[in-house]
Image (cartoon, helix red, strand yellow):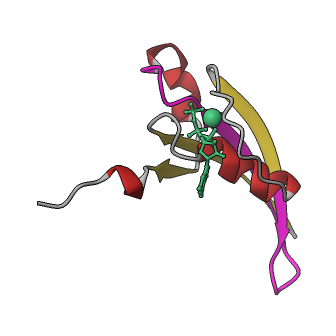
């Protein structure tokens, strides 16, 4: 049995969204920062321990735009990952 889901990744610029998407898709990590422009699509497939195949069709958005022009894509997602950079937080 296989299932497919739409997945969106959003969050502030430079916090690691593309690095995460690249890691789960290709298994690689780069220290070089190349800012995403608009969004990049990616696809990952997992097998569960019950033998089911799960495919995630992902949209990795840039953290700089307000994305008002692409909200149509937002409406067709099944799940979302919201990223932020913990090292940028201050506790008072
Ligand atoms: N130390 C460390 N660096 C990371 C980690 N994840 C990402 N980086 C670095 O942070 C920088 C930005 O990462 P990206 O994944 O491109 O950030 P992004 O959220 O996609 O940025 P935008 O596309 O501009 O929104 C890169 O230089 C990465 O190598 C992490 O977990 N640890
Ligand atoms: Mg990016």
- Please tell me whether residue 63 belongs to the stretch shown in magenta: yes
Q: Please tell me whether residue 7 is drawn above or below residue 14 in the rendered image.
A: below
Residue at 56%, 29% in the rendered image: 62
Looking at the rendering, the stretch of residues picked out in magenta corresponds to 44-66
Residue at 77%, 58% in the rendered image: 24
Front in this rendered view, residue 83 or 8 = 83
Image coordinates for residue 39, horizontal then vertical, percent: 65, 27
Front in this rendered view, residue 86 or 17 = 86
Q: Is residue 53 visible?
A: no
Toward which corner of the image does residue 70 lie, by quadrant? top right
Quadrant of the image containing the N terminus? bottom right
Q: Please tell me whether residue 3 is drawn above or below residue 31 in the rendered image.
A: below
Front in this rendered view, residue 69 or 23 = 23
Left or right side of 12 for 59: right
Toward which corner of the image does residue 61 lie, by quadrant? top right
Image coordinates for residue 42, horizontal then vertical, percent: 78, 41
Q: Please tell me whether residue 44 is drawn above or below residue 32 in the rendered image.
A: below
The quarter of the picture showing ligand 2: top right
Image coordinates for residue 35, horizontal then vertical, percent: 63, 27
Image coordinates for residue 92, horizontal then vertical, percent: 11, 60
Residue at 51%, 45% in the rendered image: 15
Left or right side of 88 for 90: left
- The residue lying furthest to the top in this view is 69
- Please tell me whether residue 45 belongs to the stretch shown in magenta: yes
Q: Is residue 43 visible?
A: yes
Left or right side of 36 for 92: left
């Amino acid at each position: 049995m296989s299932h497919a889901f739409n997945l969106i990744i959003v969050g502030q610029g430079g916090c690691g969204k593309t690095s995460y998407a690249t890691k789960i898709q290709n298994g690689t990590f780069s220290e070089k920062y190349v800012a995403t422009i608009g969004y990049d699509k990616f696809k990952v497939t997992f097998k569960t321990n019950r033998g089911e195949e799960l495919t995630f069709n992902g949209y990795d958005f840039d953290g700089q735009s307000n994305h008002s022009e692409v909200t149509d894509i937002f409406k067709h997602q099944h799940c979302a990952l919201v990223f932020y950079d913990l090292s940028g937080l201050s506790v008072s």
